[in-house]
Image: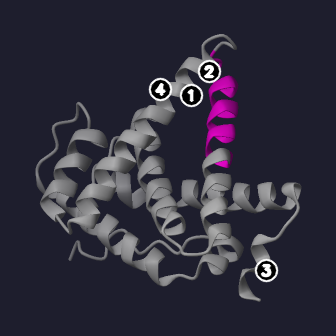
Amino acid sequence: MIFGLFRKSAPETALAADAVYASVVAAARRPEFYRDLGAPDTLPGRFELIVLHAALLNRRLARDPDPRAQAFAQDVFDAMFRALDANLREIGVGDITVPKRVKAMARSYYDGAKVYDAALDARDEAALAAALGRIVYAGEAPDEERPRRLAAYAIRADAALAAQAAAELEVAGPAYPDVTEDLT
């Protein structure tokens, strides 16, 4: 059965989720976001692009009819926050402060995912662009074109993930589209 891939032991599932999360991070760190779309190349800017990519992946897996895909969405979310916790510690955030920061990051993730979901469900590119301008470009005051291009990318990514089988997402990772496809 194709979804037999979801029947793994806990360590195997954690490894698969870690690998998928690593591909989410790799997608969010593509230089085109920063060079061509002017996303802030800062810790908050990078975090918000990771949130966007993770939220799109979670949206795809959480809407899958197979409960194992939905469970894997939670596994990837857990992998994300394990990695964020480790990253905060690595950059020198104190042990007492880390849980507060992780909680704030989780709140930011949920807030962003909720806004992105609503705009994507409504097929409202303008609302998505406004949300991305407010969240990703926070404090940067970008022109309207950059958030619009990022919104167009997010819509393409949402469609690409919807077309990818859940089992394939776990094995091969998410296939996010080219960032600069609409820049011509």
Looking at the rendered structure, the secondary structure element under dot 4 is helix
Of the residues under marks 4 and 2, which one precedes in the sequence? 2
Q: Which residues are magenta?
A: 79-93
- Reading the image, the residue beneath label 2 is 99
Answer above or below: position of 96 versus 106.
above
Quarter of the figure with the C terminus? bottom left
- Reading the image, the residue beneath label 3 is 4
Q: Which residue type carries mark 1?
A: Val
Q: Position of residue 168 (x, y in %)?
A: 64, 80
Left or right side of 106 for 149 = left
- Reading the image, the residue beneath label 4 is 104
Of the residues under marks 3 and 2, which one precedes in the sequence? 3
For residue 122, what is the image quadrant?
Answer: bottom left
The label on residue 135 is none
Nearer-the-camera pick, 184 or 111 = 111
Of the residues under marks 4 and 3, which one precedes in the sequence? 3
Q: Which residue type carries mark 2?
A: Pro
Q: Position of residue 67 (x, y in %)?
A: 63, 68
Answer above or below: position of 83 versus 101.
below
